[in-house]
Every structure is written in structure tokens, then in C-alpha cells.
């Protein structure tokens, strides 16, 4: 039988009498990238914290290369060649790359002084071996997030490592940075490292992982080869029965007779948007479906005043608006939740609170000063309302998971009490738990009278939310479907593909 790099058998752990890991099995081969998946609270982090000696198990056995080991503290984990890249970076921004890598064990000169030269040359060697083009003397605070990650990985690998754990390594990376990380992971794999990869992003898992182990509510569900399972199966296994319910559509009552909250008339912008007309009523969720490049994002960008319009009218509650830029849009009562939250929705280096109150600064000001009590109360209320998982409102946004970052973007716009919410792929890249929560928030907002436009490439999501769906193709609205009349996902898929 093939030698396993790591085997964890019957791992059990309880906190305050509540079992959070119930006899979980998990194993990783040599030179394998193994995804550990599960919704929020499934037990992934706890299992990894046991492996890295942060928590101690209640029972169960751990084997490294077939040999039973005891891991009671981080030192034991390191002795067993286990390293972890934390989701929350452990780097000190004001130190250099080299200083960070050798932080806890800088080489000393014979007089006991720190030997910078040796740190630097060792770092140079390490980075070269890892194939990373970085300068050991750069201050970490001057580097992009992608390089923080690389520094973090180099730090982990600067000690002898066989098992490398990555917890949501791409949650704050751009597409480009993610690609760099992936080719790097391929290299590590070919060098025989075993990598445990925690992520909620399915496409990533299927791109770089060999096998997947799924946990749900502290229990082991299954281990599958990526090549032998499918996205749908994995989602089903992660959420179990809960998902069916979250994705169930129910007809929502709202009136379509009065004045629409938003009306768009004859909106055109080059070839990207051609004579777009639609209305959204209070309490209604309008879905926009279409292929990539069909003009969905362009539509909300034009409405919101980011892109210019050639012609057309935007009417809010019977009043014609002159929206020339996003500030006009916000003042008119619109909010846009953009597709790329890193680029447009969120300031990653700012705190949860700072992000949330940004659009309402003028409302929480007392003279020149910010009324901290009011700002804190607003931020806290929204954090609670949206169930944002953070230690407190002062935590830096980039330290939160993707799902929670997306909820901050939502909270930020809700603080301003908009009448219309334009949402471009509101749940992209978030885990299935956060996804169902965000969907619930969207429904609640509509129930409270907001007019909502949702663009989504995920048809189950579109079907779960929309009261009506507009199909876009080459900048035009081709068709309007009432949700009631759409029987299956295939029907919607056909409508989208049919041009
Ligand atoms: P995941 O990483 O899959 O989201 P976790 O391992 O973080 O899940 O959490 C599993 C469960 O254990 C959750 O219900 C969480 O609240 C609980 N938990 C984790 N750490 C602690 C702790 N230190 N004290 C009490 N409960 C904890
Ligand atoms: Mg976790």
C-alpha cells in the first residue's frame, strides 16, 4: 500500500461539553494537494489546530509516515515537519522579508548579536530555491498582499517541512496573485510536499487539488478524488439538507401596480447597452441573467454612473435623475454591490467599522468630529444583523474570510439606507454557508421594501431569489421571464444560451 504522509484517525474534540469533532478521519499522501472542505463551523480549523499543536485532541491517533506521533504543542508539530500558513498573516509589517522569515530564530553572531547578513543570504537562497522573485530587504509593509503570502510561505518552509497547511490562502489575493500561488503549489507538489488546502472556492479546489475530504457539523462525510466527483456533489455533501431549503423559491408578495421605485428607459451606451427598458417595484427582486460579456455588469455600472451613457433616463420614484457619477447615484438612493469587492467595495487595510461607516460619514459627524458612539452603534448593529464573523468592529477587513468581507460590503451600503440595491454577483467566492446567509439578507431587504436587482451567473441562486428574470445578450434585453413560469434550471439555461 502506498505510504501515507499523514493519517488522523478517529479525531474527537469537544469545547465546553460540545463535540465539535466527532471521530473524524483524514489522510494525506506524499506529493498530494488535499482539500479540506466544509461550511462554517464544520471543524476544519479545529482539526488543523490539533495537527499544529494549538489545540490538544480529546482522543484519536495521528500518524506521520506510518509512525504514531504525539502532538501536544506547536513545537511537537514542527518536529513532525508540519507547517501552517495562517489565514490571518502573522507578519510584522515594519520588518523586512528576511527579518520576518527568521523572526523567532535569527542567526546570532559569536557575540550573540543578530546576524543580519546571514539572515539575508539564507533568505536569498530560500527564495531562489522556491523560485520566488523577491528582495529579502524589502519592508513587508511595502509589498502587495500576494507577496505577504509568499513571505509567509517562505517562512513556513524555512524550517524543514513535509506537510504544509494553507487556510484560505487566496481570500485576499487578486486573480494574478492567485495564479502565481497555484503554479507555486504545483512546484511544491512535484518536490514531494503534502499540502492541505482549505478553501471555499470550488473552482480552485477542482483546479489544484487531487482529493477532497468533506466535514459537516464536526463529522467526517467523505473523501473523493477530484477527478471522480463533481461540483454539485461536493456542494450537496457540504451542506446536506440545509441547502435545499436555502435554495427553495417561494413567491413573495409585493405590489406591481403603484409607482416603480426604479425605472430605466431607453438606456444605451455604445454597443454595450442598447435601448434597455425595465422597472423594479418596492419589494421586488429582479434577476439579470446572461453569458459573460452580455452586458450585465455594464448595465449596473451605467445606471450607477461609473460608465457614461449615450442616452436614456433613470427614474427613481417618479423623479428623473441626472446621475453623472457614483456620488450622484448614492445621493439619489442607489447602492451598488460590485462584483470585485477588493477593487471597489472594500478597503482591505481599514477596519470593519471604518468600512461600514464610510458612506455615512456625514451622518455620524458632530461638527468636524466623528460621533464615535453613533458610528460604533451603527457598525455593531450591522455586524450583528448580517452575522459578520469578526472578533470586534476594529478588526482589519483583510483578516476576515471572503464571505465575511462580502457581508461588510453589504453592511456598508445598507448603512446609507438606499431605496435600490444593484448587486453584481453578490455571493461570488464566498462559502456556501455565507452564501445562504447573504441570500437570506437579500430576501429580507426586499421584504422590507427595497427594490433589488441581482446579477448572478449561478442559476440556482438566481432562481432562489428572483421574482422576475431578464435575459441579456449582446447589450440587449432579449426576454423577460416570470419566476413562476420557470420550471427548471435547464429552462433558464436554455433561455440564456438560446441566442
Ligand atoms: P471551521 O474552520 O470548519 O469553520 P471550526 O473548527 O473553526 O470550524 O469550528 C468548529 C466548531 O468549534 C464551531 O462551532 C466553533 O464555534 C467551535 N470552536 C472552535 N474553536 C473553539 C474554541 N476555542 N472554543 C469554543 N468553541 C470553539
Ligand atoms: Mg476555519
Image: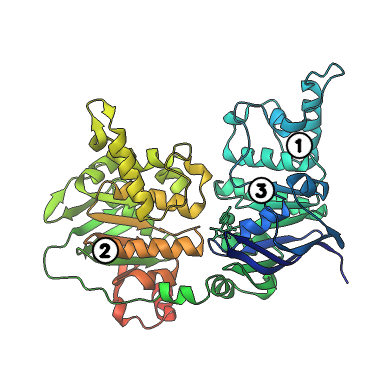
Quarter of image, res 61 = bottom right
Front in this rendered view, residue 332 or 293: 332
Task: Give the Cα separation between the discs numbered 2 and 1.
Answer: 52 Å
Question: Could you tell me if the residues under marks 3 and 1 are in contact, i.e. CB atoms within 8 Å?
Answer: no
Determine the residue positioned at 25% across, 32% down. 365
The residue under label 3 is: 181
Picture disc at residue 142: none
Whether residue 340 is visible here, answered yes or no, is no
Under tag 3, what secondary structure? Answer: helix
Question: Tag 2: Cα neighbours inside 10 Å, few (<14), some, or many (≥20)?
Answer: many
The residue under label 2 is: 446
Under tag 1, what secondary structure? Answer: helix
Whether residue 180 is visible here, answered yes or no, is yes
Ligand 2: image quarter: bottom right
Say which label, 3 or 2, has the lower sequence index.
3
Across and down, in percent, residue 378 comes to 30, 44
Say which label, 2 or 1, has the lower sequence index.
1
Determine the residue positioned at 50% across, 52% down. 402
Across and down, in percent, residue 267 comes to 24, 56
Determine the residue positioned at 41% across, 44% down. 344
Amino acid at each position: 500500500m502506498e505510504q501515507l504522509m499523514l493519517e488522523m484517525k478517529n479525531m474527537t474534540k469537544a469545547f465546553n461539553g460540545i463535540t465539535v469533532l466527532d471521530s473524524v478521519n483524514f489522510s494525506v499522501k506524499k506529493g498530494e494537494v488535499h482539500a479540506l472542505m466544509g461550511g462554517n463551523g464544520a471543524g476544519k480549523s479545529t482539526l488543523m489546530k490539533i495537527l499544529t499543536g494549538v489545540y490538544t485532541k480529546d482522543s484519536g491517533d495521528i500518524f506521520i509516515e506510518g509512525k504514531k506521533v504525539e502532538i501536544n504543542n506547536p513545537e511537537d508539530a514542527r518536529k513532525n515537519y508540519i507547517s501552517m500558513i495562517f489565514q490571518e498573516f502573522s507578519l510584522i509589517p515594519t520588518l523586512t522579508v528576511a527579518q520576518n522569515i527568521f523572526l523567532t530564530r535569527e542567526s546570532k553572531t559569536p557575540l550573540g548579536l543578530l546576524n543580519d547578513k546571514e539572515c539575508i543570504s539564507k533568505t536569498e537562497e530560500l527564495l531562489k530555491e522556491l523560485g520566488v522573485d523577491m528582495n529579502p530587504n524589502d519592508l513587508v509593509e511595502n509589498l502587495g498582499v500576494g507577496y505577504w503570502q509568499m513571505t509567509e510561505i517562505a517562512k513556513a518552509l524555512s524550517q524543514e517541512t513535509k506537510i504544509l497547511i494553507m487556510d484560505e490562502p487566496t481570500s485576499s489575493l487578486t486573480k494574478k496573485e492567485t495564479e502565481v500561488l497555484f503554479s507555486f503549489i504545483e512546484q511544491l507538489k512535484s518536490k514531494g510536499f503534502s499540502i492541505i488546502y482549505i478553501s471555499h472556492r470550488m473552482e480552485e479546489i477542482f483546479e489544484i487539488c487531487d482529493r477532497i475530504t468533506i466535514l459537516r457539523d464536526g463529522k467526517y462525510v467523505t473523501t473523493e478524488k477530484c477527478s471522480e466527483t463533481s461540483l454539485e456533489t461536493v456542494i450537496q455533501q457540504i451542506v446536506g439538507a440545509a441547502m435545499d431549503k436555502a435554495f427553495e423559491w417561494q413567491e413573495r408578495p409585493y405590489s406591481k401596480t403603484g409607482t416603480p421605485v426604479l425605472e430605466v428607459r431607453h438606456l444605451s451606451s455604445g454597443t454595450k447597452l442598447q435601448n434597455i427598458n425595465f422597472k423594479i417595484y418596492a419589494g421586488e427582486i429582479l434577476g439579470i441573467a446572461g453569458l459573460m460579456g452580455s452586458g450585465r455588469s455594464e448595465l449596473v455600472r451605467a445606471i450607477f454612473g461609473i460608465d457614461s451613457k449615450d442616452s436614456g433616463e433613470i427614474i427613481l420614484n417618479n423623479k428623473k435623475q441626472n446621475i453623472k457619477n457614483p456620488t450622484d447615484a448614492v445621493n439619489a438612493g442607489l447602492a451598488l454591490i460590485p462584483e470585485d469587492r477588493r477593487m471597489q467595495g472594500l478597503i482591505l487595510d481599514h477596519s470593519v467599522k471604518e468600512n461600514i461607516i464610510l458612506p455615512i460619514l456625514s451622518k455620524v459627524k458632530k461638527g468636524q468630529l466623528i460621533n464615535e458612539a453613533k458610528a460604533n452603534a451603527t457598525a455593531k448593529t450591522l455586524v450583528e444583523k448580517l452575522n459578520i464573523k469578526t472578533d470586534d468592529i476594529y478588526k482589519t477587513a483583510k483578516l476576515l474570510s471572503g464571505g465575511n468581507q462580502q457581508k461588510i460590503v453589504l453592511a456598508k451600503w445598507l448603512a446609507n439606507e438606499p431605496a435600490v440595491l444593484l448587486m453584481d454577483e453578490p455571493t461570488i467566492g464566498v462559502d456556501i454557508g455565507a452564501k445562504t446567509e447573504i441570500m437570506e439578507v437579500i430576501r429580507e431587504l426586499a421584504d422590507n421594501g427595497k427594490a433589488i436587482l441581482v446579477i448572478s451567473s449561478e442559476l440556482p441562486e438566481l432562481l432562489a431569489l428572483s421574482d422576475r428574470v431578464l435575459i441579456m445578450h449582446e447589450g440587449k434585453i432579449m426576454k423577460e421571464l416570470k419566476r413562476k413560469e420557470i420550471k427548471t434550471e435547464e429552462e433558464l439555461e436554455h433561455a440564456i444560451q438560446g441566442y
